[in-house]
Amino acid sequence: MRAIPKIDLKKRKSNQPHVVLLGAGASFAAFPKGDINGVQLPLMNNIVSILKLEPLLKKYGIDYNGENFEAFYSN
């Protein structure tokens, strides 16, 4: 079995294929106040704040300025 290749965080580069699956906002539209426990559902424009990823991005020197996550990830 092939091992998953490691990502070089210092170079911020991976030439390996990757997939990110996200919904189209239907879940958020159905549950605008969050799930049964009040946990908000993430969208492309708030996924970093909802999942509290800012400290992790800063730890690795990745600049994130609140842009849409799809555009951010593509860059």
Image (tube, rainbow, N blue to C red):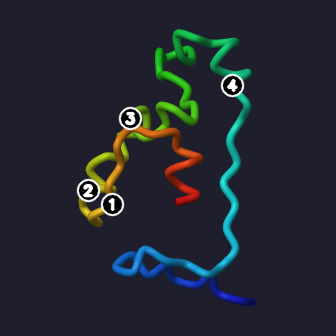
Q: Residues within 10 Å of mark 4 (few under 14, many from 20)?
A: some
Q: Nearer the viewer, residue 49 or 69?
A: 69
Question: Which is more N-terminal, label 2 or label 4?
Answer: 4
Where residue 68 appears, as percent x and y from the top left, is: 52, 39
Q: Which residue is disc 1 drawn over?
A: 62
Could you tell me how far apart the alpha carbons at marks 4 and 1 are, in whole angstroms?
26 Å
For the residue marked with disc 2, what is the amino acid? Lys
Could you tell me how far apart the alpha carbons at marks 3 and 4 are, in whole angstroms?
16 Å
Could you tell me how far apart the alpha carbons at marks 2 and 3 are, in whole angstroms?
13 Å
Label 3: which secondary element: helix
Label 2: which secondary element: helix
Residue at point 59%, 46% (across, down): 70
- Residue 34 is marked as none
Left or right: 46 as drawn, with respect to 41? left
Residue at point 75%, 89% (across, down): 1
Question: Which is more N-terminal, label 1 or label 4?
Answer: 4
Q: Residues within 10 Å of mark 1 (few under 14, many from 20)?
A: some
Badge 1 vs badge 2, beta-carbon distance below 8 Å? yes
Residue at point 56%, 18% (across, down): 35
For the residue marked with disc 4, what is the amino acid? Gly
Q: Nearer the viewer, residue 29 or 69?
A: 69
- Residue 25 is marked as 4
Front: mark 4 or 1: 1
Q: Nearer the viewer, residue 19 or 37?
A: 19
For the residue marked with disc 1, what is the amino acid? Ile
Q: Which residue is disc 2 drawn over?
A: 58
Q: Against 9, is 34 above or below?
A: above
Q: Which residue is disc 3 drawn over?
A: 49
For the residue marked with disc 3, what is the amino acid? Ser
Left or right: 55 as drawn, with respect to 29? left
